[in-house]
Image (cartoon, coloured by chain):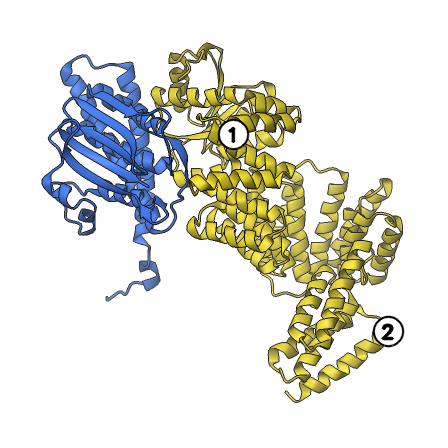
Chain colours: A yellow, B blue
Amino acid sequence: MTQFDYSKLSVLIADDFSNFRSTVNSMLQSLGVIDVETAGTSQEAIDWCARRTFDLILCDYNLGAGRTGQHVLEELRHHELISHKTVFIIVSAEASRNIVMSAYDCQPDDYLMKPINTQMLRQRMSRLLAQRQSFSRVYAAMEKGDTTTAMDVLVDMSLEEDRNALSAQKMLGEVFLQEGFYDNAEKLYSKVLEQRQVDWARLGLAKVKQAKGELEMAGAWLEKIIEENPLYLPAYDSLAQNWEKRGENHQWQFTVQKAVDISPMSILRQKKLGEVAQLNNDFSTCVDALRRTVKLGEHSCYGQASNHFQFARVVSLGMERNLDLDAGLAQEALKYLEDAEKWYQLDEAQTNQALLLKGRVFAATGESERAAELLTQAAENMESCEAQLEVHLDQVSVLQSLGKREEAQALLKSLQEMYKGDQDALKKLDAFLDEPASEANRALVATINREGIDFYNKELFDDALSCFEKARKLFPKHIGIQLNIVQAYVGKMKNGQQDRLIANECHACLELVASLIEENNPAYGRYLKLREMASATVEFL
Amino acid sequence: MNMTMDPKQNNLDFSLVLASSVHDMKNSVGMLLASLEQVIEATPPESEEQGRRFSTLHYEASRINSELVQLLTIYRMQNNFLPINIDEHYLLDTLEDQVARNHTLIETGKIQIDMDCDPDLRWCYDNDLIGSVVHNVLVNCSRYTRTRIFLSATVENDVLKITIADDGHGYPKEMLEKPASMVENAELSRNATHLGLYFAENIAAMHKQKNRKGYIELKNGAPLNGGAFHIYLP
């Protein structure tokens, strides 16, 4: 093995035990390393990296105060304080399970189990630094954004019969996938799998199929990988994407949930779980996941005020819909809004959002006066600057929650006018409108609706219902869709499928329409007729 | 007065309690080992007698440590909490890592290490798990060998064979006959639970390719005329 000139090496040791720092420091000195810095907290480690670069970082996993080596590595990457040139090793006394799970998520260059000694350290260092040197051309090319050169070098390296070939193959597969060279990626992974069944190559191949749109095949493969290695987290992430692409939102949630159960500390997965649970109207899962997202955010670079805001939004929505909620949730939402102000530097828009969301929570708990005060305060602030759409949408929600329906309608109307040409903005507005304003959503709802009507005409009521319900998820306030659902239920009941559950669903749907529809709406006649038909059918239950 | 216990309170999962305290103990012993290694490095033994004492201290601490690690691993294995991360690795790296990890034990025991491993030999296995098997056997050998330990890795008939051999008295007869089952019937012979063998056997069996799975074998005699531990991985 190559002998290194350790005297030119720069190393950072991060550990909350001073004893450990000095032990490792003296080990490094005995190897001839001169340039050593130490950090006792995660923040110190990050500060060091903001000031200068290191060849090697030895970072303890458990850094105290809730922070881990994974947090440090994620933050260093997030703020681009570290490049490929730095070798990052996580050192740990933890059980290897946590480390393996953490390594799946943050991919350090290596990890070392405590207790460590000089010999172990020397061996690992020389191995990793040699590898780093061999890949220096690849890293240099990637840093310049020159992926073509990086790929060329990696192809050459992966064909060599030496110890870098394997790492080169892994990296090449990822670059191929990322750059859209799916056929090359497929060839590479298939070739690896001819030799040995390794999970990373099986996952790679499934990802290729997924990227090519062969979703069912990719999904089946991913499920097989998980069945054989139930703790292989990266496979869950791909499978979740697979269900998402197939529009199977319940399977999607189930998969994210399983990954979260295995590794509950991942803030990004918790956040994803919150999103998908909301899509599925699974309120309690959504609230739990968002709560964890907020809490994990305290120590993570992925913590954001918007997570706190989302918690408040979902809790308010639950109260507005009269869901049977834990009484403490409103207080919790208010607390998180205050935490957002304490933990993050809120810009003007976010400050107004926090005010509006507090107002919405108060409105939902019946404290209309306080809500109105906050609303006025926010509105005054917003006058002085041009507010963003998101802030306005929160404003609409408070107005609605306070029962100021006309003001809310007027605001929505002016927003529609303001964002006339902006399809992305119109899409966001759609969720608040009776009819979609954006072209894409209009087309989408028309297609799904048409499909549903086809099924209805063939008396395939369940298929029709699943189409209409899909459309309803996208546009919860679209009266036409709601009425289609009612009609499908009525059809189903007339066809002899009568039970309490269907009748209840039908009734709930009619009630929702009742709360949305005005007498001057062109669909009002249809609504009355369906209402009559429904009650006629339900009567003989 | 006759008191009845609340059955709910009694329903404490003892294996979980045990596992978490094993986890704590393991971390403590880990600290103890690290401090011990520092002491030995800072104040090298001044006499043969002292060297032997250091060696015993270090060996016993290492043994507790690796036994606790094994307990924890078996707990996880049984609860499907054990991640297995199979990838291609260089055998030389794996073996050298474990020799380096036991550097103090080998130095204080004045043991000569010989290794026979093609530097280009690579194979698919879980490096952490196989590493810990090799580590346990090394700790054990360092206690029972006289002067030498021999490590090798070769491929025979598309099966990887890792050997760790010593020039001690060899394995007792009953261990040679039925190694892994000994733990299951919980016969404690000569203060040894043979937990290590159970652990190694299970780890080996977690390595599967097509219809074959890994296994272990204990022999006496070749190559050093002492005990020889073999692990076979397809």
Q: Is residue B53 left or right of residue A433?
A: left
Name the one closer to the observer, A486 or B50. Answer: A486
10 Å crowding of disc 2: few (<14), some (14-19), many (20+): few
Read off the residue under disc 1: A168
Name the one closer to the observer, B53 or B157. Answer: B157
Q: Quadrant of the N terminus of chain A?
A: top left
Instruction: Name the element at disc 1.
Output: helix
Residue type for callout 2 = Glu
Q: Quadrant of the C terminus of chain A?
A: bottom right
Q: Residue at x 68, y 35 (%)?
A: A345
Q: Which mark is residue A457?
A: none
Q: Is residue A105 left or right of residue A320?
A: left
Name the one closer to the observer, A85 or A201. Answer: A201
Instruction: Name the element at disc 2.
Output: loop
Name the one closer to the observer, B167 or A7. Answer: B167
Q: Position of residue A501 (x, y in %)?
A: 61, 77
Name the subunit of mark 1: A
Q: Specify the quadrant of the image occupied by residue A62.
A: top left
